[in-house]
Image (cartoon, rainbow, N blue to C red):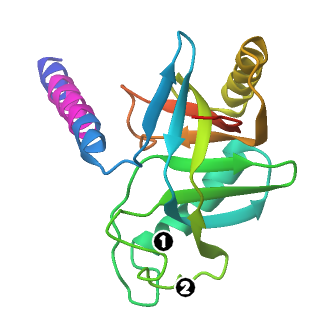
Amino acid sequence: MKIVLIVFGILMVLFIAFQIYTYVATGKSQSQPYQVVRTEDEFEIRYYPESTMATIKANSSSYKEFSSSQFGKLASYIFGGNRDKKQIAMTTPVHMDFGDSVSKMSFVMPSNFTKESLPAPNNPNVSIELVSEDYVAVISFDGFASNETIKNQIEKLQRILKENHFSYYGNFRYLGYNPPYQLFGRRNEIIVSIEWES
């Protein structure tokens, strides 16, 4: 019994150390730059400058189905699945844009790359896109994302924008900042493009 408790204690220490390491490592990843232009109790408005993204599209409108089937295919590109077999650093957040039938997932490319300097993907379903500057409304939530939590957060942001008389357009998008094995300190966001005049 004593040996079992000792082994269990060691495993718990290793688990906690791994979670702390994951939390710290995620915080050190290069993140997509933005500027906060307005902050309220429940939401904020951000300006995102032009960015370069690697994107994959699929016929799906479900977060669970889409993320599980497409993440590995897109990640393959930055792990060497490209013409130059080049390793590209992972950045945060992962973007997911859910349409009625077609959805897309995007990784923001590190700032030292341009659309022209990035190697061509081996997977024909992965494309390199230049995304225009954008003003977005944002709400954040913690924990693990699911189809239900994303739906609820989208409805919450819709309500907030209506109450604050903001016009929005395009699909609501999900931003995820953490690997699936990180249990604590998780960060999730829902964003949508808005009409904004500086």
> Residue at 87% across / 48% down in the picture?
100
Residue 77: image x %, image y %?
48, 74
Q: Tell me the quarter of the picture where residue 10 sits.
A: top left
Residue at numbered disc 2: 122
Image quadrant in which the N terminus is located: top left
Q: Is residue 86 above or below residue 159?
A: below
Residue 140: within the magenta? no
Q: Give the range drawn in magenta.
A: 8-22
**Label 2, residues with CA under 10 Å away: few <14, some 14-19, many ≥20:** some
Q: Tell me the quarter of the picture where residue 87 sits.
A: bottom left
Residue 76: image x %, image y %?
48, 71
Residue 132 shown left or right of residue 26 in the figure = right
Seen as rendered, the residue at the extreme front is: 198
Residue 165 shown left or right of residue 112 in the figure = right
In this rendered view, identify the residue nearer to me: 192 or 123.
192
The kind of residue on which mark 2 rests is Asn
Residue 154: image x %, image y %?
72, 27
Residue at numbered disc 1: 76
Secondary structure that dominates the magenta span: helix
Q: Tell me the quarter of the picture where residue 185 sits.
A: top left
> Residue at 22% across / 32% down in the picture?
20
Residue 115: image x %, image y %?
49, 76
